[in-house]
Image (cartoon, rainbow, N blue to C red):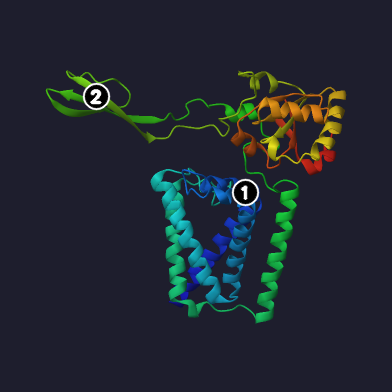
Amino acid sequence: MKYIVDLSRWVVGILFIISGLIKLNDPVGFSFKLEEYFSQGVLNIPFLEPHALSISIVVVILEVLLGIMLLVGYRPKFTVYSLLGMIVFFTFLTFYSAYFNKVTDCGCFGDAIKLTPWQSFYKDIALLVLIIVLTVGIKYVNSIANYNIRRGIVLLALLGCVLFANHVLNHLPVVDFRPYKIGANIEEGMSMPENAPQAIFNYEWKFNVNGEEKIYVTQGDYPTVDGEYVSVETTEIQKGYEPPIHDFTIEQQGENFAESLLQEDKLVMVIAYDLAKSDYDAFTAIKTVTDKAKAKGYKVIGMSASNDELSGKIVTKYNLDFSFYFTDETALKTIVRSNPAILVLEKGTIKQKVHYNDVDDLKF
């Protein structure tokens, strides 16, 4: 039993630390996922949405600390039962998402490792079994050092997590796992490679044949049936290739200018997914830096999901020498974890990307 407990301890501890650190690298991204869970139509607890970022930070730091506490044997009963409670909740959440098809990605490993809802559920089931093993064999969860050393390790880990979270919140994630990372070309990210797998669908055609309902299954063709058509249901049986970037547009008055703008030799994008939630003080610095960019031959545009009235007010109030285009809010949240932020591109390739706190670091 001791060897099984030791194996479970290392697997659970390491997985919790890795999962927590990946999300701690991008707590804003995890908060967006929590907002999705809290929203109406999913868990229907929208009053938690304004607190999603705070909850995400607490959850991911707790995840890291519990993993470390398990490995060093610090307060084993508290640690194991906390892990049990956490995994029971996560298992319920992933099952709910998978069964009702509510959230297509749990965000368990951030953008580093994408899991389908059912994959997330099976992963949580495996962890649940391992944690139950730990619960049954809790007497075998031994300490690796004396109490003060263990407590010191946990306190240092807590301090490190808090400092790291503060850094990424005031700048950007240290490691960018998204398709809009520095060096990525947006047009290439939207392209379909040759011979890319296509999605395959089953079509269940229902016909009334001589007073009896019959179903005919095809993969797209309309069946030749001597009867009266009733209905058709479509089921995807094989997913096709989906480009990493598939929802990117830059629109004004209903026209998409993405293709032409991504050919610009020098392009600066000021991105604010929601101007109503932006840090307005940042626009003073953005005014200075974008004027500097324009003087050096850069084309400057704004990108937001806010309406023209609000973007117009921002332009007027801060005397901005550029106009805003419309881009989907989810796409903008994916591009950069700052509201506002600035990207510098050359022919669609992202050369620089900064948080609004770091606009002075841009080089033109």
**In the rendered structure, which amino acid carries the disc numbered 1?**
Pro
Residue drawn 81% across and 39% down? Answer: 359
Q: Please give the residue where the numbered disc 1 appears in the rendered image.
A: 50
- Residue 354 placement: quadrant: top right
In this rendering, position of residue 348 left or right of residue 33: right
Quadrant for the C terminus in the image = top right
Q: Quadrant of residue 272?
A: top right
Q: Element type at marker 2?
A: strand
113, above or below 142, in the image: above
Give, as a three-letter code, the residue at label 2. Val
Whole-Å distance between the Cαs marked 2 and 1? Answer: 46 Å
Q: Label for residue 358?
A: none
Q: Earlier in the sequence, mark 2 or mark 1?
A: 1
What residue is disc 2 on?
230
Evaluate whether residue 302 shows in this view. Answer: no
Which residue is more in the foreground, 353 or 93? 93
Q: Is residue 248 above or below residue 32?
A: above
Q: Position of residue 22 (x, y in %)?
A: 62, 53
Q: Residue at x 42, y 35 (%)?
A: 239
Residue 119 image point, x, y percent: 44, 49
